[in-house]
Amino acid sequence: MARKTKSRTIAVRLISMAMTGYYKTFVRPRAHRPLSMLKYDPVGMTDLRGMRTSGSMSGTLTDRSQEESLVP
């Protein structure tokens, strides 16, 4: 029996680096190079007390107390 051919497109899910649960789904051709982009994260860009945003377009949110506790 012959093998099934691969589809020409791939469904790609870009997830937030801020771990907010926000994601964006795209369909891209299989032959193109891998997809990477910076988009606005509406959940991660909120400015909370004790937290800072690291960059205007990155969408990442870091907490200083968590950073210090992760370092051995």
Image: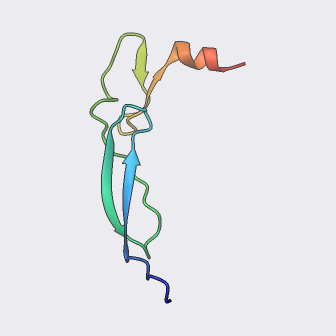
* Residue situated in front as seen by the camera: 45 or 6: 6
Q: Position of residue 25 (x, y in %)?
A: 31, 53
Residue plotted at (47% across, 63% down): 34
Name above or below for residue 16 compared with residue 70: below
Q: Is residue 12 above or below residue 70?
A: below
Residue at image position (33%, 38%) is 22
x, y percentage for residue 37?
Answer: 39, 52
In this rendering, position of residue 66 left or right of residue 36: right
Residue 41 at what x, y percent from top left? Answer: 31, 37
Q: Quadrant of residue 7?
A: bottom left
Is 46 rendered above or below residue 32? above
Residue 6, located in which quarter of the rendered image?
Answer: bottom left
For the view shown, which residue lies furthest in the bottom direction? 1
Residue 31 in picture, x, y percent from top left: 44, 76
How many marks do you count on the picture?
Answer: 0
- By what rule are the colours in the image chosen? rainbow
Residue ranking furthest to the left: 42
Q: Quadrant of the C terminus?
A: top right
Decide: is 5 above or below 55.
Answer: below
Q: In the image, what residue occupies the spot 32% across and 64% down?
A: 27
